[in-house]
Amino acid sequence: MSTTGKNPSAALIAGLKTALTGVAVGSVTYPVYDTAEKGATNRTYVYIGNYLDNEEGTKDDFVYTGSIAIECVDEGQVQNVRRSTVQGLNNAVRAKLKTSKGAVFSVTGFTVIYFRHAGSTQTYENNNGRATVRIIDIYEFSIE
């Protein structure tokens, strides 16, 4: 068990961001964000967020179990947004995080006990001619 007594959220997000940096579909590399950034209005990207955890243990030993969402997003004019683009990006992200690959990424200062896919959902938003397609994957973890 971890004896640091520090929440691993920042280290987990940093580890995921490092693991996913350079994620590409074909010859196109997509950015990975760990904050909800407003930028160009026509864009495709990966967003790491919605971290939830539960701390368990004694005052000397801690284990954290929880979940984190990884979103693959395409936003832009309705006629330019493509579900296939988001699906391709989501497949590339899943391939990088496949749990059968062993140690996929590190979490500085902590030990990852498990990190596994727990489900996904897709959303489509249309607001005044602007559209957003998201595939949101939820991953469960246990870290000590």
Image (cartoon, rainbow, N blue to C red):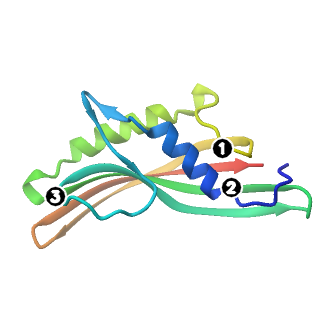
- The circle drawn on residue 68 is none
The local crowd at label 2, few if under 14, some if 14 to 19, many if 20 or more residues have their Cα within 10 Å, is many
Residue sitting at the far bottom: 128
Q: How many marks?
A: 3
Of label 3 and label 2, which has the lower sequence position? 2
Q: Amino acid at mark 3?
A: Gly
Q: Residue at x 71, y 49 (%)?
A: 142
Please indicate whether residue 6 sits to the left or right of residue 44 in the image.
right
Of label 1 and label 2, which has the lower sequence position? 2
Q: Which residue is mark 1?
A: 107
Residue 13 horizontal/vertical position (percent): 55, 51
Q: Amino acid at mark 1?
A: Val
Please indicate whether residue 28 sits to the left or right of residue 18 in the image.
left
Q: Which residue is mark 2?
A: 8
Q: Residue at x 19, y 60 (%)?
A: 41
Please indicate whether residue 79 sits to the left or right of residue 104 in the image.
left
Residue 8 horizontal/vertical position (percent): 68, 55
State the SS at label 3.
strand
Spatial CA distance of label 3 from label 2 is 34 Å
State the SS at label 2.
loop
State the SS at label 1.
loop
**Quadrant in the rendering for residue 103:** top right
Q: Which residue is mark 3?
A: 76
Spatial CA distance of label 1 from label 2 is 8 Å
Q: Amino acid at mark 2?
A: Pro
Q: Residue at x 30, y 42 (%)?
A: 87
- State which mark lies toward you, 1 or 3: 1
- State which mark lies toward you, 3 or 2: 2
> Pointers 3 and 2 in contact (CB under 8 A)?
no
Of label 1 and label 3, which has the lower sequence position? 3
Residue 93 horizontal/vertical position (percent): 42, 38
> Pointers 1 and 2 in contact (CB under 8 A)?
yes
